[in-house]
Image: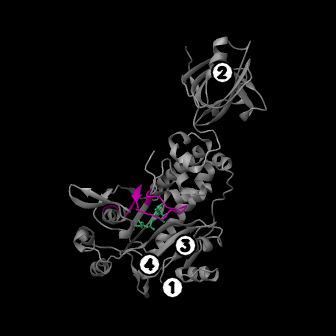
Amino acid sequence: MKFGKTHYISEITPELQGREVVVAGWVYRKRDLGSVQFLVLRDSTGILQMVAKEGECNEETLQAAKRAGIESSLRAKGIVRQDPRAPGGVELVLKELEVVGPSEDFPIKGKEGPEFLLDHRHLYLRSRRLQAILKIRAEAIKAMHEWFYKNGFIETEAPTIIEQVVEGGATLFELNYFGKKVYLTQSSQLYLEAFITAFEKVYTIQPSFRAEKSRTWRHLTEFWHAEAEMAWADLNDMMDVVEALVKYVAEKVVERRSEELEYLKRRFEPPDGRFPRISYDEALEMAQRKGSKLSWGEDLDTPSERMISLEFETPFFVHRYPRQSRAFYHMPDPKRPEVLLCADLLAPEGKGEIVGGGQRIHDYNLLLERIKEFGLDPSRYTWYLDLRKYGTVPHSGFGLGVERTVAWIAGIRHIKDAIGFPRTPTRTIP
Ligand code: NSS
């Protein structure tokens, strides 16, 4: 069968009334009325109603339409007809139909629970819901690259197999590397700190790994991490950069993916104005007023973050966490050594932390002291310490969780749905 140029479904508009076109895609829905067959075709750009009717097409086409099960792949040729009742205001009157890949008894019928859908993720990717979320994700990542590029950051890559603890021993994945114990990276930060001596402003977007047993809505064992590091930058500079980046990403997603947000019934306004900046002390007080039992010195837990984050309409920073609550590399505040020059960005609506970062220790002796204080082996940090020995500079950086950011923008409950194939403590397949 000769078909000619294939159109995307979004290109089939009422202006093409009466024209012959070819489309290709998968059967999204169907209705069998015997002598009339309705097929709704889906591709990456939308859905299109197609009709095969006795008298309007040959018998072969009618039979092919009858045979085509849900999610079979098709190529179809037909005439565009305006129909205000059809999605997009047009339907296709079928002339020829080729079932390219048949599909019988597609396992997902629409009423399955979340575990079943995760087991069948390779098939569930075709759902319009995941399609919409993953398009938003792709747009967010693209906007991040754009922002970094426009603002003079050089893209770099860090290794995945590393020897250093970055964010604490409790969440390390160990690997047997020819008999030596190494880890999957928790963050590219230490490597970005090396790159800044070559490029000053650098970033990377790549996976980080955490052996998180906590099964909250916001933890994955493998997540995508957008991290940046800047020479000659302090905590305030870092917060300015995070604010500008997050605003840009939110704006671009709304500008370019409004249809997908609408499909998800997400009313999302990109934040404008300055993001509030509150201290850990203020945040803790807010949480305590709302019933949190945390005391000064403890990191804000998920429920406390949630309570605080419900009070805000835009993302906001919480800065200067207690010294004992954060990783070894954070710079203590010279004015108040019991707190660190660090900040998290929390998303509103109860979502909580999406970014963590701050100013790093750039003094050799202080860093060595902190490495020992944390019970880490300084010999594994020789190269990292070297950076403080040869032309050290004040510097700051941050890491943004891609899935958490997408979950906030798209308004989805669990970050599992913000990535194609999520990894959790109990799931490594598909
Ligand atoms: O642990 S972080 O708060 N900070 C770091 O890893 C720094 N070393 C980053 C840096 O300064 N270059 O993680 C940063 C963000 C955090 O705010 C979350 O948005 C995300 O990474 N994150 C996660 N997302 C999904 N699942 C898990 N388990 C997870 N852990 C962190």
Q: Which residue is mark 3?
A: 317
Q: Which residue is mark 2?
A: 66
Give the residue drawn at x 67%, y 12%.
Answer: 59
Depth check: 184 or 70 in front? 70
Q: Amino acid at mark 2?
A: Lys
Against 111, is 161 above or below? below
Measuring from the top left, give residue 322's x and y in whole percent: 46, 82
Query: Residue at left 61%, top 27%?
Result: 69
At label 4, counting other C-alpha atoms closer than 10 Å, the crowd grade (few under 14, some 14-19, many 20 or more) is few
Residue type pointed to by label 1: Trp
State which mark lies toward you, 3 or 1: 1
> Which of disc 3 and disc 2 is earlier in sequence?
2
| Labelled disc at residue 261 | none
Q: Are marks 2 and 1 in contact (CB under 8 Å)?
A: no
- Around disc 2, counting alpha carbons within 10 Å, would you say few (fewer than 14), some (14 to 19), or many (20 or more)? many
Q: Secondary structure at mark 3?
A: strand
Q: Is mark 2 within 8 Å of ligand 1?
A: no
- N-terminal label among 2 and 4: 2
